[in-house]
Amino acid sequence: MINYPAWFYFPSDQPAPKWAASFLEVVAGAKDKLDTRTVDALTSDKVLAVLRPGLVDLGYEVEAGKKNAQKIRRPVLFGDQGVERVAYEVDAVQDELGILVEIEAGRGARGNAVYRDLVRASLIVGATFLVIGVMLEYRINTGGKTVIVRSFEDSKNQLDAIYASGRLGLPFQGVLLFGY
């Protein structure tokens, strides 16, 4: 069992699929560049740049930048003559397995980005699995005091509440949450 990254697979009554181990190995291999307990000033773009080579080796398409040609869009709705009418951008995708990846940084700690990711990914055609990466620790300086937000634990609690309550059904076979 690996100690880094922290991770949890939902639903918790199912084992994580085989692809999850390879994905997590890529993240573990970048610990010295990504571990938010010791590395500061990470953005989701920086995290993606570090993970990109390993994920590409696993068959993922990974956002390369902010220009339209570098972004990854996946369809939600189609219109006349089957033309994509609504699409959402994702950070990475493995189309063969239906895996969508979203990486969140500081905003993910306090801005309900996990909920946004869940809803948007739920609407994407062909999404079978969702991977969400969040910071293990996010430090906020307020009034001269540093507050540590434990994003992974907060996100895990949010997902656990969704799955345990049974009131909100998600269309995924599973969600892999990891803390970097």
Image (tube, helix red, strand yellow):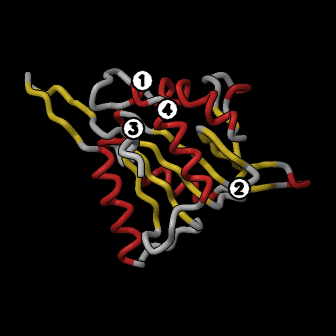
The residue depicted at 15 percent of the width and 34 percent of the height is: 147
Q: Amino acid at mark 4?
A: Gly
Q: Residue furthest bottom?
A: 166
Tag nearer the camera, 3 or 4:
4
The vertical placement of 160 against 140, above or below, is: below
Q: Is residue 49 left or right of residue 135?
A: right
Give how far apart the Cα atoms at labels 3 and 4 are.
11 Å
Q: Is residue 53 left or right of residue 107?
A: right
Q: What residue sits right under mark 4 in the picture?
A: 29
Residue 93, quarter of picture? top right
Within-10-Å neighbours for mark 3: few <14, some 14–19, many 20+:
many
Question: Disc 4 on helix, strand or loop?
Answer: loop
The residue depicted at 59 percent of the width and 46 percent of the height is: 22
Give how far apart the Cα atoms at labels 3 and 1 are.
10 Å
Give the percent coordinates (x, y) of residue 25. Answer: 52, 41
Mark before the other along the chain sequence, 2 or 4: 4
Q: Quadrant of the C terminus?
A: top left
Disc on res. 97:
2
Tag nearer the camera, 4 or 1:
4
Give the percent coordinates (x, y) of residue 26. Answer: 54, 37
